[in-house]
Structure formats: structure tokens, C-alpha cells
Amino acid sequence: ALQGASTSHVQKRRDARTVPRGSRATMARDGKSDMKEGSYSNESTEGAAGAPTAEEGKYKSIPSILPLAPGGVYAVKWETREKWAAPLQTPPVEYSPPLGPPNPDNPLCYFEVRAGGYYLGRVVFELKADACPVTAENFVKLCEFKCYAASMFLVYPGNWLRGGDFTDLDEVLYDPNDPEYFDFATLLPGAARGGQSIYVSDAGPYFADESFAISHDKPGILTMYNPGAPNCNGSQFMITLPNCKPTALDGTHVAFGQVVEGWNILSALEQLGDARQEGETFQRITVETCGVVRYGKSGEGGVVAAAAAGGVV
């Protein structure tokens, strides 16, 4: 008898799962109904969901790039998800290098940036080797050996962008067999979590704060990230955004450079940040590749004329 009851129960559950799309299953809620308690009606009801229309169907392929609310319900409308699945727009913006025209004796490094899988362009930094030679050399070498390639950005709207953690790479882009990427597993298998500097001593793979002479009072300042403790400079860095308060960084973070080209790209990235200030982004932002434009006094190359003159970049 138990076996028969169990079989009957399983059959009812199977029947419930095979209700045709576009029909609404309704349960009888009182004894006066013509239906038996627990039985289902497969009669179609007005407004029931059927096959998606062409307008609805175009949203089906949009990736779930935004977090879910409790219970698995999308926290945003489909229209918003569609917006964040589209290429980020990077229109020209008025910008002048915050530390003045670049010194031709200082090195220049570059990042090629992607967001949401779309290529956005190149960003060029001047490293202030004339003020912070040790810190500048660390950044130059990490760019030269492609350590920043496939690393990702965090965004803190109204404050800064943060990047440089080469222990958390974009697995979609990263390929250790490609010379454009550093083979960490072979060449640096014991890399410190969160990244590290090129300077390794008995105290660890970090180096001391070099100078606090440069203030963080304008957007486009390139500065070192630290976990809140002094003399813990590794590979991570930050780039100040408009409205960043200098008091949040001055005296604790070593500013050592500035953006001289591609500010429109970095400026546009701010809108991808989460207002909760947790660094999460609506699109994955990745350094596709990196390198050195020039090495300084002994190197070759020049700066972009528009950036040097303080024009539209």
C-alpha cells in the first residue's frame, strides 16, 4: 500500500511539471469546486506567459553581469542590464596633467584597457622618477615584464580607481604561453597575495614609503596603494578621480606619477563603479596588455602633444 501511495505521489509531481507553457495551474480552494482538492486545471488564462516576443527575446542573451537580489530575483530591470552589456562610451573630456607638462627625462608607461570585453584604448602614465625614482622604477619594471597584463581594476566612484593585483587575473584574457603575459606559475610561483614589488628583502616583497611630497589634490594622480600600514608598497596602485579628497591619501600614500594620455577612458570607468564603495564593477575592467613607451633620459619617445598642452584628451 505504501509503495502504491508513493508511486501515485511521484506521478502527480511529474504531471505538475508537465503543465503546458502558457497555461496556468490552479488549485481548488474550497469544497464547492467541481475539481477535487489537490487537482490541477490546465485551462488557459488571459495574460498567461507564452512564447517570448521579438522585443522580449532580445534580452534573453544578455549575460547576468549584475548581482541578484535575495531570492534570486534580478535587482535591476532588463533595460539596465542591457545598458551595462553595451560598449562603454569614452567621449573626449577637458583634462590637463595635474602635475604640469611631462618632464621629457621621465619614463612613460602604457596600459591597453578593456571593459566588458570591449577595447577602450590606451592610457599613458608619466612616472615622476625625478621625485620618486625608487617607486617609479618599480612601476616601470612591472610594466616592462608584463606583470600588469590581465590584471583588473576596482572602481570607487568619487574617489579613485585601484589596480595592480597580479594574483587575481582575468582568466578570459590571461595566457601564460603568450609573450604578452607574464608566466607567474613558472617565474614567480610564490608571489605574495595581492601582488608584490620588484624589491625583495628579509622584511618581505615590499618597499618603504619614498616621499609624500606630491599631493592628491587633482584627478589623474598615480599613487601607490597600501593596506593601511606604512612601508607596505607592492604592485598595487590607485588613480585619483574627480572629487577625491586629498586628506584621504596625503601623508599615507606615495604619489609618483600622472596620467598624460587617455584620461577620457579612465574618467568613463567611474560610472561602472558601485555606489557602495566596495570596488565592484558592472563590467569587468581589464588591462589587456602593458609596456614602456620610453625609459627616461636614456630612452626614446615623447608625449602626446594634446596632453602636454593641457587640451582635450
Image (tube, grey):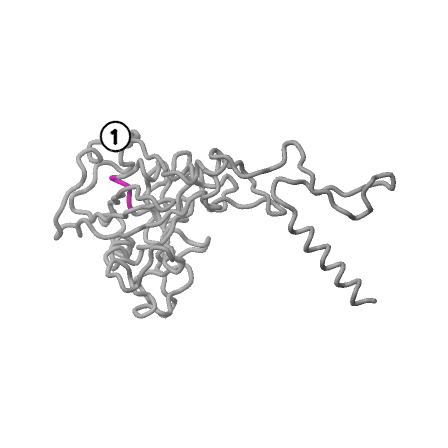
Type of amino acid under label 1: Val
> Residue 229: image x %, image y %?
45, 55
Nearest the eye: 179 or 110? 179
Query: Going 30% across and 51% down the picture, which residue do you hit?
Result: 288
Q: Is residue 259 magenta?
A: yes
Q: Secondary structure at mark 1?
A: loop
Q: Is residue 295 above or below residue 27?
A: below
> Residue 65: image x %, image y %?
47, 45
Q: Quadrant location of the C terminus?
A: top left
The residue identified by callout 1 is 312
> Residue 273: image x %, image y %?
45, 41
Nearest the eye: 128 or 192? 192
Q: Left of 81 or right of it: where is 165? A: left
Q: Quadrant location of the N terminus?
A: bottom right
Q: Left of 61 or right of it: where is 214? A: left
> Residue 193: image x %, image y %?
42, 62
Nearest the eye: 48 or 165? 48
Nearest the eye: 32 or 297? 32
| Residue 149: quadrant of the picture | bottom left
| Residue 168: quadrant of the picture | bottom left
For the magenta stretch, what is the residue range?
257-261
**Magenta stretch: dominant secondary structure:** strand
Query: Going 26% across and 52% down the picture, which residue do you hit?
Result: 290
